[in-house]
Amino acid sequence: MTQFIFLAAAEAGNPIEEISRTFGFNMHHFVAQVISFLLVAALLYKFAYKKILGVLEERRQTIAQSLANAEKIKQELASAQTKAHEILSQANAQANKQIEEARAVAAKVQEQETQKAIAAANQIIAKAKEASEAELVRMKGELRKEMVRLVAETTAKVSGKVLTLDDQKRLADETTKQLAA
């Protein structure tokens, strides 16, 4: 093909022939370089470029899968947070309901115990008015004991636990101090 170009150049004038002589163009060297380039390009394509493309594709898939997993995890986290919020709301509502029920029961028990204590106190007062001074002192002692017992009993019922001896003694001391005042 270059021979045709050289022939055409020789007939039309010498510019191409002069340029090829000036730069030292040799057709045999040019063909050898083209073949060498094509051979190196084919080897690189077969052994390097395909592997690089494979690694890049594998990486692209891993990244896509990671992004999909991240989105899935984000959705699961949002779902879990919503569910946790719902559970907390339900638990708070239930706790508030139980607190209100406990307050109502405690108020009712307190009212009953207060009425019982008032009735007992009125009986003791009526008997104390009829008795002598010694009887009055004895009745006050019994009243204190009765109040301590009622306070301990009421406290045990309201708190829902059995009072230990230390708790009973502490309540008795507090009740005695309050009655003395």
Image: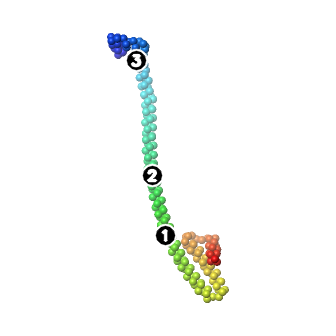
Query: Residue shown at 52%/73% (left/top)?
Result: 107
Q: Amino acid at mark 2?
A: Ala
Query: Going by the image, does 176 lie left or right of 68?
Result: right
Residue 31, labelled with which disc? 3
Query: Residue shown at 41%/12% (left/top)?
Result: 21
* Dot 3 crowding, Cα within 10 Å, few <14, some 14–19, many 20+: few
Task: Provide the residue designation for mark 2.
Answer: 78
SS for dot 2: helix
Tell me if label 2 and label 1 are in contact, CB under 8 Å. Answer: no
Task: Provide the residue designation for mark 1.
Answer: 101
Q: Residue 52: percent from the left, percent from the top?
A: 45, 32
Residue 73, labelled with which disc? none
Query: Residue shown at 44%/46% (left/top)?
Result: 71
Determine if residue 68 is in view: yes
Query: Going by the image, does 114 lie left or right of 29?
Result: right
Disc with the residue nearer the chain's start (2 vs 1): 2
Q: Residue 106: percent from the left, percent from the top?
A: 52, 72
29, above or below 106, in the image: above
Label 1 to label 3, Cα distance in Å? 101 Å
Disc with the residue nearer the chain's start (1 vs 3): 3
Q: Residue 181: percent from the left, percent from the top?
A: 63, 77
Q: Amino acid at mark 3?
A: Val
* Dot 1 crowding, Cα within 10 Å, few <14, some 14–19, many 20+: few
